[in-house]
């Protein structure tokens, strides 16, 4: 499509209307994307049967494909289909993928959990690839709508608006999905189908809005630079493999036989920038913990606000886009100008280094919060005894002399009697035991019994296990040692039902339309995973006998004491209590990571654009997105290794500290590579300033008949330089003066170059001081120019004497 005619000179260009179609369409697309992907880990774990680790791995791989696709999308749009057509086709595919993914949550039409799992993965794959293919094309199409340089400032503001749309869509999409999922029931469970179908409808609207603006879009001409650069690299590699042109200074110079020098130079610069990109993936591997590990961390925290409202865990990830929307204007308008006046963080690379440091500090905070919610594991030399008082009165537990309790420092405690309040419990966490199961006889007394009779009961203790003892009116009931005190790895609630009396075959916990059935055998059920809700307790599917409220990340024993109509017929005892650390403590780590994102990501985009050669900017932008793919795959690999080795099981803080250490090492590597890159960059700038200016000097200063000769002499200096270099290297090799001391050799060359610069400056002053003789023809030309200047001076005098004439003439 062609650009409209330019307005008269001096008239400011109007903001392109086509941009509004692009911005609104992309806002809705990001709304849909983050609504579907934001809580995908939670959805796959809850509804599709994935574990938290496998769900995180699948999501990371899928998002990796999304950020891998932009390179293919850029080639497809720039070379074959055009940008607008590519975006429209991908939007249609995106809508189909979102619909397929939504259907996986329609439980009645899914034949099995495996069918739902396959449908969900297929939908994610389709919509993810479609989103990736159009990702880079969408933003570049928006930038194409502006006429540069007249609208360069407006074009820069477009990128701010575009980034805002991304984060506004993320905030709205994640919030809407989390709220509807948590407040609406579908098919007897949390409702995902309703919000997902709403998102499909919004994607249809997004596609329609984009299509309505197609007649207004201005597309940049196709650019095959990426393909030519790839051919150049492949040709150079092939010639290097064949051993051709061994005297080439750089391996890419072997492509000079087929490609021009400008392309080769651009490819060299691009490859050096790509080497710096190798440090980007680890940052993104850490950053995407906000949509996986940090969500599972939020599930372990207390999200209650008041008595009735509980913050859905997946809503914690909305802190990031909310902070982005707030902090970007603050950085742009306040922080960066202030730092600029102080001369601090004025370069993009310095901001990137500080951004990495913020990511490290964020994961230290992440580890601290995880440490506060991690449960205490029972060592193999100790056992835990948990006693529940289901009696209608207080009770006391009396330990035998041979049973020893120890404190946190390993000191034995003398206390042998422990009071248990009504409906209360007592946990003896550190009971010394041997390697084999140990039978211990304890005694129980109760205040509501006649006299002070002690009831003996035998309890089995086992190292690293927890044993339970339930005190009921029918008598004490010991339970076998178990490892079920451990919290669920996915931070869900675990519940076991204990029936004290009566012939009970099944106990049901019911919340609205959701029913969880517990088969009872010998008065005891197995532990089951439940969503955190206030449940009603039904015995044998009939009358309600009481209520049992369970919280996220807790392990509970629900003791049923009687039948329907009896007072206090149900008691709930936490085996392992959920964390009381509030979800608000997530804010510091999200704040630090978001500041790191702004410093690293936005500055990284600017670095990739500003350092790239003019014809290679789109390539480096696509490569910048590709580092996100590598980061996601790196994260998936780390999670897979962690899952197989179980190295961080119940110890997420250790994993966070490992990531912080890796990021710290990565920051050091990036800084060192940056120093190497700047040395190449300065050398390249010096080459451009000296070589190009030297060619111009040789041509402009030479007499007309000698210009070719002086150009040849200029090239001959390169030959002399190469011979001089060869002589210096030969002397160095023979004398072994710089063996294992390349830095000393570099300093020698720097000193020689400094001396050479001084000599050149002195010679240049002498050259400029020598009077230049002018050829006769040139003297005649100068005489004519002087006569013209004299005539112009006379005209200016007349104009000064008669200003009215000048004004009339100007009109």
Image: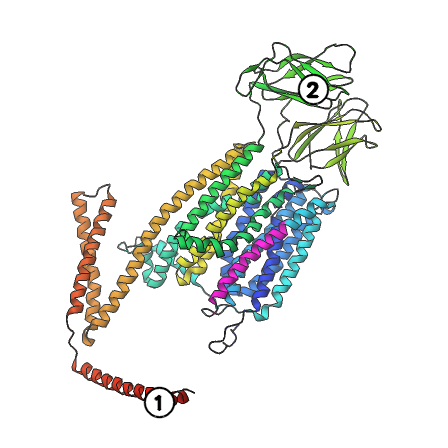
Q: Is residue 116 left or right of residue 796?
A: right
User: Looking at the rendering, in which quadrant would you find the C terminus?
Assistant: bottom left
Residue 703 makes an appearance in the image: yes
User: The magenta stretch spans which residues?
Assistant: 150-174
Q: Which residue is mark 1?
A: 802
Callout 2 environment at 10 Å: few (<14), some (14 to 19), or many (20+)?
A: many
Q: Main secondary structure of the magenta part?
A: helix
The image shows residue 187 at horizontal and vertical percentages of 75, 44
The image shows residue 567 at horizontal and vertical percentages of 82, 27
Residue 164 on the magenta span = yes
Tag 2–tag 1 contact (CB < 8 Å): no
Q: Which residue is mark 2?
A: 420
The image shows residue 1 at horizontal and vertical percentages of 53, 72
Residue 88 on the magenta span = no
Give the residue drawn at x 15%, y 76%.
773
Q: Is residue 791 left or right of residue 631?
A: left
Q: Is residue 107 left or right of residue 720?
A: right
Closer to us: 472 or 68? 472
Q: CA distance from mark 2 to mark 1?
A: 113 Å
- Judged by depth in the image, the label closer to the viewer, 2 or 1, is 1
């Amino acid at each position: 499509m062609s650009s409209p005619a330019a307005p008269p000179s001096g008239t400011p260009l109007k903001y392109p209307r086509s941009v509004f179609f692009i911005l609104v369409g992309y806002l809705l697309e990001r709304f849909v994307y983050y609504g579907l992907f934001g809580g995908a880990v939670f959805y796959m774990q809850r509804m599709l049967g994935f574990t938290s680790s496998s769900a995180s791995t699948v999501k990371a791989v899928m998002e990796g494909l999304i950020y891998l696709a932009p390179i293919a999308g850029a080639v497809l749009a720039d070379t074959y289909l055009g940008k607008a057509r590519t975006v429209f086709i991908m939007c249609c595919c995106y809508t189909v993928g979102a619909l397929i993914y939504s259907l996986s949550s329609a439980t009645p039409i899914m034949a099995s959990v495996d069918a739902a799992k396959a449908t969900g993965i297929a939908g994610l794959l389709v919509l993810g690839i479609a989103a990736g293919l159009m990702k880079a094309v969408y933003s570049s199409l928006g930038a194409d709508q502006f006429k540069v340089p007249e609208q360069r400032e407006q074009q820069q503001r477009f990128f701010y608006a575009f980034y805002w749309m991304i984060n506004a869509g993320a905030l709205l999409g994640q919030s809407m999905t989390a709220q509807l999922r948590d407040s609406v029931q579908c098919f007897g469970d949390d409702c995902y189908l309703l919000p997902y179908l709403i998102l499909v409808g919004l994607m249809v609207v997004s596609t329609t809005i984009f299509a309505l603006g197609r007649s207004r879009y201005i597309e940049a001409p196709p650019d095959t630079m990426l393909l030519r650069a790839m051919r150049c690299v492949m040709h150079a590699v092939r010639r290097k493999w064949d051993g051709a042109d061994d005297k080439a200074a750089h391996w890419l110079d072997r492509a000079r036989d087929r490609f021009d020098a400008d392309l080769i130079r651009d490819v060299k610069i691009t490859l050096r920038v790509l080497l710096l990109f190798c440090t980007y993936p680890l940052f993104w591997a850490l950053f995407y913990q906000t949509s996986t590990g940090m969500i599972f961390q939020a599930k372990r925290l207390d999200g209650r606000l008041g008595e009735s409202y509980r913050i859905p865990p997946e809503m914690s990830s909305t802190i990031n886009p909310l902070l982005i929307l707030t902090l970007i204007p603050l950085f742009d308008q306040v922080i960066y100008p202030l730092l600029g006046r102080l001369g601090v963080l004025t370069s993009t690379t310095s901001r990137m280094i500080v951004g990495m440091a913020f990511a490290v500090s964020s994961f230290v905070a992440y580890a601290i919060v995880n440490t506060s919610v991690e449960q205490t594991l029972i060592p193999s030399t100790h056992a835990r005894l948990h006693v529940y008082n289901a009696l209608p009165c207080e009770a006391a537990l009396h330990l035998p002399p041979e049973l020893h309790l120890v404190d946190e420092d390993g000191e034995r405690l003398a206390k042998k009697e422990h009071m248990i309040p009504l409906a209360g419990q007592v946990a003896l966490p550190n009971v010394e035991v041997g390697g084999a199961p140990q039978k211990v006889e304890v005694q129980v007394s109760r205040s509501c019994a006649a006299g002070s009779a002690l009831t003996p009961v035998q309890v089995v203790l086992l190292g690293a296990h927890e044993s339970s003892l339930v005190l009921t009116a029918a008598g004490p009931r010991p339970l076998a040692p178990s490892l079920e005190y451990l919290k669920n790895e996915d931070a869900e609630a675990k519940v076991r039902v204990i029936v004290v009396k009566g012939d009970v075959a099944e106990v049901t916990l019911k919340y609205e339309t959701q029913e969880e059935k517990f088969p009872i055998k010998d008065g005891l059920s197995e532990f089951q995973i439940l969503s955190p809700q206030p449940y009603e307790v039904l015995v044998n599917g009939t009358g309600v006998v009481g209520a049992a409220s369970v919280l996220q990340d807790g392990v509970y024993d629900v003791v049923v004491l009687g039948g329907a109509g009896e007072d206090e017929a149900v008691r709930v005892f936490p085996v392992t209590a959920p964390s009381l650390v509030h979800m608000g403590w997530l804010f510091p780590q999200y704040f630090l990571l978001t500041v790191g994102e702004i410093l690293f990501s936005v500055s990284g985009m600017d670095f990739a654009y500003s350092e790239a050669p003019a014809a290679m900017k789109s390539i480096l932008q696509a490569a910048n997105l590709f580092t996100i793919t590598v980061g996601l795959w790196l994260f998936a690999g780390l999670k897979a290794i962690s899952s197989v080795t179980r190295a961080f099981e119940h110890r997420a803080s250790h994993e966070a500290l490992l990531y912080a250490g890796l990021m710290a090492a990565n920051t050091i590597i990036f800084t060192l590579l940056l120093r190497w890159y700047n040395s190449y960059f300065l050398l390249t700038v010096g080459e451009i300033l000296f070589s190009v200016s030297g060619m111009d000097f040789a041509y402009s200063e030479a007499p007309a008949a000698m210009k070719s000769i002086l150009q040849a002499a200029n090239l001959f200096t390169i030959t002399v330089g190469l011979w001089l270099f060869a002589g210096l290297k030969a002397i160095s090799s023979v004398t072994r003066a710089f063996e294992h001391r390349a830095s000393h050799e570099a300093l020698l060359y720097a000193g020689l170059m400094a001396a050479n610069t001084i000599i050149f400056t002195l010679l240049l002053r002498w050259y400029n001081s020598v009077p230049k003789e002018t050829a006769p023809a040139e003297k005649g030309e100068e005489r004519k120019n002087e006569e013209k200047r004299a005539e112009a001076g006379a005209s200016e005098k007349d104009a000064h004497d008669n200003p009215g004439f000048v004004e009339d003439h100007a009109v």
